[in-house]
Amino acid sequence: MIRTHKACANMPEMVSYDTAQALLAATLCDLPPIGMERVPTALASGRILAEDVHALTPRPEADISAMDGYAFRSYDMRNAGDIGLPIVGHVAAGDRPVPLSEGTACLILTGARIPEGADCVMARERTHVIRNRVTLTDQTARVGLNIRREGEEFPLGQCLLQRDQSLDWRHIPLLLSQGITDVSVYRPITVSVLANGAEFASQAEDAREELNTHMLAAMLRSDTVHVTRQVAASDREEELRNALLHCVEQSDVIVTTGGISVGQTDHVLSVLLQLGASCVFRRVSMRPGKPMTVMRLGRKIVFCLPGNPGAAALCAQLFVIPFLKAMILSSDLPHSGLSMRGRSTFAYTPPQDATCFLPVSILQEAGAARFHIVPSVGSSDILCLTRADGIMRIDAGQSVQVGDWSEMLPFTGLRL
C-alpha cells in the first residue's frame, strides 16, 4: 500500500465528485499569476487579451461616404431642379478633399471623406449625368443622406475590448483599425503530460503502444496551452522521479496518467510524496475515474489520471480542462459542464455510492435532443469515444428512465 502523507491524514480516502471539484477550485487562489507578453496583432487570434483596449481614434475618423455617388449641398440640388449641378472634381478614399464650392457637386467613392460644404451623397444609380451636370432621378436630397458620421461606430476613448477577452478573427481588424500592431496577451501555460510503465519500453516482452499522452496532448493543446509529452518506460522509481522532476522544471501544470493504483509497480503517488507533494484529494467516488487524484507540488498542481484511456479522457474533460481555463483567465473554476439538455432514450440506475458518467450520442428528434447511450466494454474502451458526442452525468442513487429530461457535457477541447 502507498503510505498516506501527513497532508492527507485528515482527509477521507475518497471524496465525492462535487467535493473533488470544490477542493480543486480552492487551489486556484494560491497559484502564481500568468505572465504577459506582446505579440503581433496579426498573430494574436486564439490568445487571451491581458489589458483593456480603448479607441485611439473615433471610427470613422471623419464623415465619409457610405457609397459611390455624388456629394453636394442638398439645398443647392433642390434649387437646381432639372438643370442639376455641375460636377467639379472627384474624391476617393485616402484623399484630402478641398472644400466644395457653392452650387457644385463632386464625384465621390465609398469611404472617401466628405468635402467641407457637402451635406448629402446620392448613389450613382439614382442620378443622371448630361454634359457634366448631375440631376436626381427618383430620390429627394436630404441632409445626411448616405453619410457615415465621425464616431458613429465608436468615439475616441471608448473601451473596445476588455482584459481576458479571447481573441479571434473578429478582433484583429478592430485592433489594426486603431493602429495597434502588437498587443499584450497572457503567455501560454505549459503542461507536461507524463505516462509511465515498463510495458512502453520497445524491448519489453509484451510491449504496448503508449496512447494516453498522445490523446491528452491533442485534447489540451491550443494557442493558450503548450503541451509536452514524456514517457518513463520503466517501473523503476528513480526513472519516474527524474521524469517528474523534469516535468516540474519545464511546466506550469503536470498531468500524469497511470501508476496511481496500489499495485507493486504503481509509484507515481509515492514518488510525488517523496518530492514533497501534498494531497488535494485522493480518489473520487465516480465511474469511471475512481483513482483520480490531485496533488500539489510547491505552487504547481499535478493531475494524476487513471491509466485506462477512457477514464483518463473523462477525467481530463471534467477536471483538467476547466482548471486550465480558470488558470488562464485568473477566474473561478467554471462549472464543468452539463450544458445541453435533452431526453434520455434509455433507463439507467447508478450505484448508491458513485456519480456515473456515461458516453452518449446526440440525435435531434421531433425538435428535441435525444441522448443515446454508446455501448462500451469499460474504461479502457477507445472506440466508444469516437462514437460518443459527450458524457451524461447521473448522480449516485438517481435513476434515469426513458424519456426523462437529462443533461450532458459535450466533449470539448480547450476552447475559451
Image (cartoon, grey):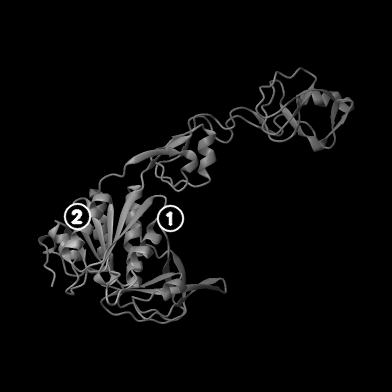
Kindly identify which numbered label has been placed on residue 415: 1
Task: Tell me how far mark 2 sits from mark 1, CA to CA.
Answer: 27 Å
Report whether 121 appears left or right of 294.
right
- Residue in the picture at 44% in, 78% down: 373
Is residue 139 in sight in this rendering?
A: no
Out of 218 and 74, give the one closest to the viewer.
218
Out of 228 and 135, give the one closest to the viewer.
228
Kindly identify which numbered label has been placed on residue 297: 2
In this picture, is 136 found above or below 276? above
Out of 275 and 146, give the one closest to the viewer.
275
Residue type marked 1: Arg
Out of 391 and 248, give the one closest to the viewer.
248
Report whether 73 appears left or right of 386.
right
Residue type marked 2: Leu
Name the quadrant containing residue 1.
bottom left
- Residue in the picture at 58% in, 28% down: 61
